[in-house]
Amino acid sequence: MIALALREFHQFQASGRQFLYLVPSAAVFELDPVAGAVIRLVGESPRTEDAVVAALADRFPAPAVQAVIEELRDVRAIGYEQQPDPDSPKFLPMMPFPLSTMVLNVTNQCNLACTYCYEYGEDKIVDTENGKQSKFMTEATARDSVEFLLKEAGNIAHMTFFGGETLLNFPVLKSTVAYARRRAAEVGKSVDFSLTTNATLLQPDIIDFLADNEIGVTISMDGPKEMQNKFRVFHNGAGSYDMIAPKIKALLRRHRSRPIGARVTLTSETLDVTRIYRHLTEEFGFWEVGFAPVTTSPNQQYAIGDSGFDRMLGQFRELAFEFQEHVAANKHHGFSNIKDTLEEIHKGVSKAYPCGAGLGLMGVSTDGDVAVCHRFAGSDTHKLGTVKDGINRETQKEFLEHHHIADKTDCHTCWARPLCAGGCYHEAHVRYGTTRRPNLHYCEWIRGWTDTCLQVYGDLSVRNPDFLARFDRVEAKAEAVL
Ligand code: SF4
Ligand code: SF4
């Protein structure tokens, strides 16, 4: 008889129970006492089914152990030694894949000069100052972009206005919303709008427009005054906190039609995640706060190193468990990073690609070039087509072919790959000069964070399963724009 051996999973505990995260299927499986005992035994050393039954005979009846062994084999938590599971085949998505989110860079200019900015800083890909791209998108290009989106999208299309500083081109944004609404109704689709802004140009008429048109707003902001003013400065070096604080408060008072979120860039010098979270939720009243580590080459002094990732993970954990306690008590908590990952775990997401870039999400430059995402907008080497001529399917296919998880051999033994899939292409481009490489510099952080999210998921599956069931009802939403 062939011995049974463990297959690929990540084991974790939550609410005093044992769970497995099954890597090939990205499913979460709770272990009952019999299953826990079988896994422990087979984990000590491979052994035959009869040997497992015999070893557990004084605790569990043989039929119960045999049934559990069969179940564990079915879910591929265990399998026969010397009969490895076949590798997952490399499937490319069916084409044409519907476009879900189009990020429209209505300008590449900005009235701030944030030190770490990927568009203006030393790690920039596109020269938006002296390059060939227009500094502002015209109304005609924005309309072509709307037509492109409505043609490529399914019944619901998401349109995100982005920059530079998005509100520097408010007139085009405003006319585009009206045009997109009208055209979407004509073709029987619906379109949803959002924008990201640094908040410096918010004023009453703009706030009224955003509220009245139910436009989702994300404010790029780094926290309390000294953190905001460290990097988010005007061209003369002055900090932006005092200018934006009253404008954000006015926005939050008036704009009630959509929850307003803040998006924080973390650096080695502004890593106080919990303090930033409290400031933005308690002082300002943001509904949600999302954090992302700065994208930069490692030699910038604000780059986050290994000890910084450890510190960041500790604070993310603190907020994650605070989120867990709030949700268990049916209370809102605004730490958005965990919510997004919980949703992916709940839906059993197993990614062939780290994000929707080049697939369901694309970025449009001021001139109407379509790139894999907004961070590559205007880059000739990452161009997939134009809004006028459409997507070059061969180029898109080649991109998807070369960025598939199957080609990231370093990730093949990593249990976190269903959720990570190698990480952001832009980060990889900045770090390694190519979008094709996985971001191996932050694997420990990714695995630590994924383990935390799994623990919270396991806990909530016991204490508040209704909260998780809500993810079944939420229809696929726009990819996070980083
Ligand atoms: S980049 Fe690292 S954490 Fe992500 S899937 Fe690859 S090996 Fe795992
Ligand atoms: S994760 Fe990176 S590559 Fe993907 S959409 Fe965001 S910025 Fe672009």
Image (tube, rainbow, N blue to C red):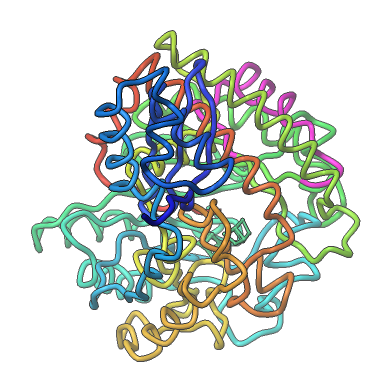
Q: Is residue 220 left or right of residue 345?
A: right
| Residue at 65% from the left image edge and 29% from the top image edge | 317
| Residue at 85% from the left image edge and 33% from the top image edge | 226
Q: Position of residue 118 (x, y in %)?
A: 69, 64
Q: Is residue 72 left or right of residue 430?
A: left
Q: Position of residue 324 (x, y in %)?
A: 51, 19
Kindly tell me whether residue 59 is visible in this rendering. Answer: yes
Q: Nearer the viewer, residue 120 or 58?
A: 58
Q: Residue furthest bottom?
A: 394
Q: Nearer the viewer, residue 416 or 331?
A: 416
Q: Is residue 50 above or below residue 159?
A: above
Q: Is residue 199 above or below residue 123?
A: above
In the rendered image, residue 24 lying in the magenta stretch gets the answer: no
Q: Is residue 312 above or below residue 174?
A: above
| Residue at 44% from the left image edge and 25% from the top image edge | 254
Q: Is residue 259 left or right of residue 233?
A: left
Question: Magenta residues, as a range?
Answer: 267-290
Q: Nearer the viewer, residue 263 or 249?
A: 263
Q: Residue furthest top?
A: 329
Kindly tell me whether residue 259 is visible in this rendering. Answer: no
Q: Nearer the viewer, residue 191 or 423?
A: 423
| Residue at 72% from the left image edge and 75% from the top image edge | 432
Label total for image: 0
Q: On the rendered image, what quadrant is the N terminus found in?
A: bottom left
Q: Position of residue 24 (x, y in %)?
A: 40, 55
In the rendered image, residue 280 lying in the magenta stretch gets the answer: yes
Q: Position of residue 380 (x, y in %)?
A: 55, 87
